[in-house]
Amino acid sequence: MADFNKFVEIDIRAGTIIDVKQFPEARKPAFKLEIDFGHLGNKKSSAQITELYDKNNLLGKQVLAVVNFPPRQIGPFMSEVLTLGVPDGNGYVVLVAPETNVENGVRLY
């Protein structure tokens, strides 16, 4: 069984995607995202979500991300947060998002 104290160590926050760029250097098709986390500032994330999303439906979308993992170098790109998603029936990533808009930077509890 998981320990609740370990769970709360993972800092999951809501943010709004404010920029999307193609990431041609990635091994698998991906986007470079810039996400506004309010008082935490803007953070960058690499996301393999090209099957279900494009720039038009990502800009302005709120997502949940882990903001306290160490940054991870992905090719020439430094990913600062882990954007959360779950696989659909075809194995494509569906982003995890609040049902309604919330304040950027608010923490998941």
Image: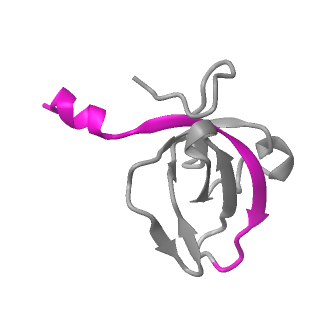
Q: At x 39% / y 22%, what residue is drawn?
A: 109
Q: Is residue 14 magenta?
A: yes
Magenta-tinted stretch: 1-25
* Nearest the eye: 38 or 6: 38
Q: At x 76% / y 47%, what residue is drawn?
A: 18
The image shows residue 63, relative to residue 41, as above or below, that is above
* Nearest the eye: 26 or 36: 36
User: Residue 68, position in %: x, y?
Assistant: 39, 49
User: Residue 7, position in %: x, y?
Assistant: 26, 34
Colour option used: one colour
Q: At x 68% / y 54%, what residue is drawn?
A: 34
Give the number of callouts. Answer: 0
User: Residue 63, position in %: x, y?
Assistant: 61, 37
Q: In the picture provided, is 9 more to the left or to the right than 105? A: left
* Nearest the eye: 65 or 41: 41
* Nearest the eye: 80 or 26: 80
Q: Residue furthest front?
A: 39
Q: At x 44% / y 37%, what residue is drawn?
A: 12
Q: Residue furthest right?
A: 56
User: Residue 67, position in %: x, y?
Assistant: 46, 47
Placement of the N terminus among the 4 image quadrants: top left
The image shows residue 32, relative to residue 39, as above or below, that is below
Q: In the picture provided, is 97 more to the left or to the right than 34? A: left
